Image (tube, grey):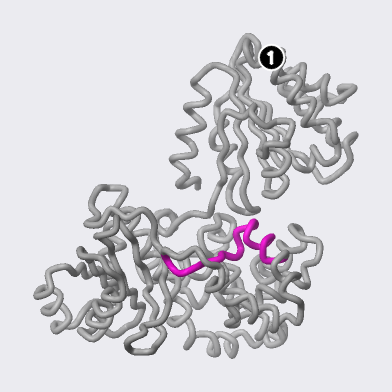
Amino acid sequence: MFIGREREMNSLNRLYTSDRFEFAVIYGRRRVGKSALINEFIKDKNTIYFMGVESNAAQNLENFSKTIMEFGTGVPAQMAFVSFQAALEYVFQLAEKERLILAIDEYPYVARSSKSLASTLQLLIDQYKDHSKLMLILCGSSMSYMEDHVLSYKAPLYGRRTAQMKILPFEFEEVCRYYKNFSDEDKALVYGIVGGTPQYLLQMDDRKSIEENIKNTFLNPISFLFEEPENLLKQEVREPALYNAIITAIATGASRMAEISTKVGEDTSVCVTYLKNLLALGLVRKETPYGEKTSRKSIYFIDDNMFRFWYRFIPENSSSIVRGAVDVVYKRMEPHLSDYMGKVFEEICKQYLWKLLLTGKSSVEFKELGRWWGTDSSARSQVEIDIMGEQDQDTALFAECKWTNEKVDVGVLEKLAEKSKLFHYRNIRLYLFAKTGFTKGCADRAKEMGNVEMVTYRDIIEFLA
């Protein structure tokens, strides 16, 4: 079942209906659904679809030639073009009279094996673009390669593309649409456990409980997800052991550069390089307090929910899992799930606030959202604000997010109001987000204050549905 990606599909269809030469670059992490997007788009369209393989140039040219010949004749053919230039020129000529899509999936595999491929494409695009009806799609999972060798200023293909799309994991709203049988709470848990990567979502069965799903996937040595993070790192990086150590350090509480460096036993300069690559892969995010640019306060956290869940619970229990002690391991994990979901709920609340803004229903027209942490000098204590967003120098919103089974009481509201006074905004809007609801005292105080929005998880689900 294909869901979501409406914006990307609309963009591709606009390019297709232009009836002139178009060149779209599609890239993103593995498993994120790039190939599914392309295949959904090219349904019922005149298309040559070619998937590159991690082999040499001769093998890729042979496979490409067969794909072209089969498109032209409808039957398998053994003929091979003498070069990629000859093959591509033939395709460009086919597209002179009718609309034709050429989609090269896993383009980095082909380009690495044939060093002149990018220059050949540049030559042919420049030669044919003014009278061609070809729609060229280059797609790749190696984000660094696509950014450095296709999109960058120094790349031969720079300036030729007419569109580029970085495909990201689904947001919570799309995950909810995918699962019909999970309860509302279970949808949040699934999002927290596997995130929005389509291939990971496919591993979860909404006819079973969350407990059964965790046991069947993460706690099952033969399942796809049991070794997925390590396997993915092996595909993406050259020294997976050190990357693995860095992610483990972050997952187990080290968030600042010095802490990460100490925990993995490497110099800070080494960790900086490795973290840079993890940031580029979208597995780790670097964050500074909202509104501050200094890196002195920067922290790192795992940005992919599946990686975050896996590194939080699996490595420390791997011996027990391999021995089949599934029930024992789950009992160890279960008490920590609610605490683990705290950060996930913050992200869901951010997505809710963004949708409010995009639909014209936000009371504060913020430019961005983020967390803030720092020192309350009057109380001489460290303070954290889950979410804040500024409209201008006078107006901002502040939010607190609570994923607990207890109703949020007035104390939480009053603390948030106090934290907001650390800033000098005249117009302040406070948001309280709660999993289960609010006490009467909290509701009464919010009404009295007049600048408070109280939002339950049920409200979020109904708004996003």
Q: Is residue 308 magenta?
A: no
* Position of 236 relative to 403 (above/below): above
Q: Is residue 358 left or right of residue 45?
A: left
Q: Where residue 200 appears, x then y in whole percent? A: 58, 61
Residue 376's quadrant in the figure?
Answer: bottom left
Closer to the camera, 442 or 430?
Answer: 430
Q: Where residue 96 appears, x then y in whole percent? A: 65, 11
* Position of 382 relative to 447 (above/below): below
Q: Amino acid at mark 1?
A: Tyr
Q: Which residue is mark 1?
A: 128
Residue 153's quadrant in the figure?
Answer: top right
Q: Is residue 285 magenta?
A: yes
* Position of 170 relative to 101 (above/below): below
Q: Where residue 23 appears, x then y in whole percent? A: 61, 28
Residue 37's quadrant in the figure?
Answer: top right
Closer to the camera, 275 or 185?
Answer: 275
**Boundaries of the magenta span:** 274-290
Quarter of the image with the C terminus in it:
bottom left
Q: Is residue 199 visible?
A: yes
